[in-house]
Image (tube, helix red, strand yellow):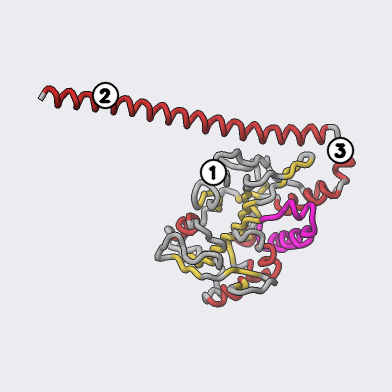
């Protein structure tokens, strides 16, 4: 009996030691994560500092006369947000890539259906909408099946397109017609289709776009527009959407390093939230928020978010 008790005490002594070692390892891991985060923040500060020094010694008149600055300024002006007087904003989806900030008007009696383009392995936004009793029509031709099922999910192995044609691709107008939603006036949309969004909106009539009370679009390729040949397409699409909708929130995707030029910053990829202008007559006011806001989260966990200040350019003042 004494021998058994001795072995038992020895076991608990060893177990206690193992717990201490485990705690020490966890503390070490936390310290390493903190160090990594500090290094990443330092890297971004150095990038900002380098940008600041670069343009500190640059003639401001020449800088603002450059093609790069003019292109960047035009795009920022087309993306400048406003606010909804008295509105509340919520995060729908997970706390990283796949979660989006929206205006909090997703009541079942106000939203007739939701469209989700680009699913991959994440359905957190779709779940956030479905839990409110809203049917979600989901499209992605690059996956075999959804990672999770839900009674409110309606999945189709089809991709959305515009002028481009291909197998398992249909236009937004065609998909809305197939779902008998042509008469609907209160749809919502989330779109993350890796750059194909420009083709979709270029082809989609404004009458169809205006069926959506809220649009959440992840726009890609802004730096390509500034430096490349896509500038006209991108600015034309932004002007088209702005005729029916107003941006009320945006968030820079931190998987890529943005362009800093003078006082402007332009992420390569932006998550943009639009509301329909006719829904908020006389309620759209100047935004006083700074982006990212308190409910934004970095797309790339562990890396600092992209600070964009107010991301606003007064077009009238700029043109004077």
Q: Which residue is mark 2?
A: 13
Q: Is residue 257 visible?
A: yes
In space, the residues marked 3 and 1 are separated at their CA atoms by: 35 Å
In the image, 310: left or right of 187?
right
191 versus 157 height, above or below: above
Q: Nearer the viewer, residue 166 or 83?
A: 166
Indicate the position of residue 42 as horizontal and vertical percent values.
64, 31
Residue drawn at x 80%, y 50% as measured from the top left = 316
The answer to whether mark 3 and mark 1 are in CB contact below 8 A is: no
Mark closer to the chain start, 3 or 1: 3
In the image, 23: left or right of 101?
left
Q: Which residue is mark 1?
A: 295
Indicate the position of residue 29 as horizontal and vertical percent values.
47, 32
Residue drawn at x 75%, y 47% as measured from the top left = 313
Disc assigned to residue 60 = 3
Mark closer to the chain start, 2 or 3: 2
Q: Secondary structure at mark 1?
A: loop
Tell me which segment is drawn in magenta.
220-246
In the image, 109: left or right of 232?
left
181 versus 312 height, above or below: below
Residue drawn at x 78%, y 42% as measured from the top left = 261
Q: Secondary structure at mark 3?
A: helix
Indicate the position of residue 38 as horizontal and vertical percent values.
59, 31
Question: Which corner quadrant holds the N terminus?
Answer: top left
Q: Nearer the viewer, residue 195 or 75?
A: 195
Residue drawn at x 54%, y 53% as measured from the top left = 98
Q: Is residue 186 visible?
A: no
């Amino acid at each position: 009996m004494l021998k058994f008790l001795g072995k038992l005490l020895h076991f608990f002594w060893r177990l206690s030691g193992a717990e201490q070692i485990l705690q020490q390892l966890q503390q070490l891991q936390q310290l390493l994560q903190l160090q990594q985060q500090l290094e990443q923040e330092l890297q971004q500060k150095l990038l900002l500092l380098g940008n600041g020094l670069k343009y500190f010694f640059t003639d401001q008149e020449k800088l603002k006369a450059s093609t790069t600055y003019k292109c960047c300024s035009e795009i920022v002006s087309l993306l400048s947000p406003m606010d909804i007087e008295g509105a509340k904003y919520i995060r729908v989806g997970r706390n990283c890539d796949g979660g989006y900030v929206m205006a909090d008007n997703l009541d079942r009696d106000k939203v007739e259906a939701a469209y989700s383009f680009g699913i991959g392995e994440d359905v957190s936004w779709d779940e956030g909408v479905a839990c409110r009793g809203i049917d979600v029509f989901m499209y992605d031709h690059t996956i075999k099946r959804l990672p999770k099922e839900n009674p409110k999910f309606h999945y189709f192995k089809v991709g959305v397109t515009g002028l481009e044609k291909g197998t398992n691709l249909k236009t937004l107008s065609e998909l809305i017609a197939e779902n008998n939603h042509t008469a609907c006036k209160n749809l919502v949309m989330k779109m993350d289709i890796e750059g194909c969004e420009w083709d979709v909106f270029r082809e989609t009539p404004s009458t169809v776009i205006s069926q959506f009370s809220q649009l959440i679009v992840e726009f890609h390729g802004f730096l390509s527009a500034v430096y490349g040949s896509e500038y006209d397409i991108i600015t034309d699409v932004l002007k088209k959407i702005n005729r029916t909708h107003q941006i009320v929130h945006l968030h820079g995707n931190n998987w890529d390093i943005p362009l800093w030029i003078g006082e402007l910053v332009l992420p390569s990829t932006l998550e943009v939230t639009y509301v329909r202008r006719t829904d908020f007559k006389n309620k759209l006011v100047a935004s006083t928020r700074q982006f990212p806001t308190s409910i934004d989260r970095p797309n790339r966990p562990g890396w600092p978010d992209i600070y964009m200040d107010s991301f606003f350019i007064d077009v009238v003042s700029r043109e004077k």
